[in-house]
Image: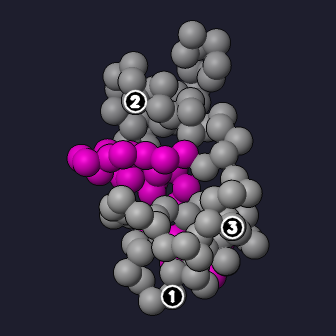
């Protein structure tokens, strides 16, 4: 199924960028690649974060703001706004049980 959904070259690039070489990681890579909505990643070992950071580094370099942050960052709203308007990747880390209500309109549109 994996080879049907993505090419071997794409998987090879993922592996070079740090994706672990196991079936579950490849399936998760497909979800991230093919999903129309934002992916929610639970990543206690930071493997996905490392891979995403390498994979989207060039795209994120084009954005004016920070692209990896957490809910405690004072400029979070500005960073999210920049990412949405610029169509650049954005990683929000260390989310616990609740998210600030200012994000509800953003999440509702996803």
| Image quadrant containing the N terminus | top right
User: Do the numbered discs 1 and 2 sit on residues whose CB atoms are within 8 Å?
Assistant: no
Name the residue at 58% across, 82% down. Answer: 77
User: In the image, is residue 49 above or below residue 1?
Assistant: below
Name the foreground residue: 108 vs 36: 108
Q: Is residue 49 above or below residue 86?
A: above
Q: Secondary structure at mark 3?
A: helix
Pinpoint residue 66: horizontal percent, then vertical percent: 51, 78
- Please count the marks in the image: 3
- The magenta region covers 39-68
Q: Earlier in the sequence, mark 1 or mark 2?
A: 2
- Which label is found at residue 9? none
Tag shown at residue 75: 1
Q: Residue at x 45, y 89 (%)?
A: 74
- Real-space CA distance between mark 1 and mark 2, rounded to the nearest whole angstrom: 32 Å
Crowd class of label 1 (few under 14; some 14 to 19; many from 20; radius 10 Å): few
Q: Closest to the observer: 68 or 76? A: 76
Q: Is residue 48 highlighted in magenta?
A: yes
Determine if the magenta segment contains residue 37.
Answer: no
Q: Which residue is mark 3?
A: 105
Disc 2: which residue = 25
Q: Residues within 10 Å of mark 2 (few under 14, many from 20)?
A: some
Nearest to viewer (mark 1 / mark 3): 3
Q: Spatial distance from mark 1 to mark 3, Cα to Cα? A: 18 Å
Residue 17 to residue 61: above or below: above
């Amino acid at each position: 199924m994996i080879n049907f959904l993505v090419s071997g070259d794409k998987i090879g690039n993922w592996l070079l960028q740090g994706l672990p070489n196991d079936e579950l990681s490849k399936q998760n890579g497909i979800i991230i690649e093919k999903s129309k909505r934002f992916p929610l990643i639970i990543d206690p070992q930071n493997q996905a974060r490392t891979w995403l950071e390498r994979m989207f580094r060039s795209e994120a370099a084009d954005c004016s703001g920070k692209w990896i942050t957490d809910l405690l960052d004072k400029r979070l709203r500005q960073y999210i706004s920049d990412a949405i308007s610029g169509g650049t990747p954005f990683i929000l880390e260390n989310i616990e049980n609740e998210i600030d209500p200012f994000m509800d309109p953003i999440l509702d549109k996803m």
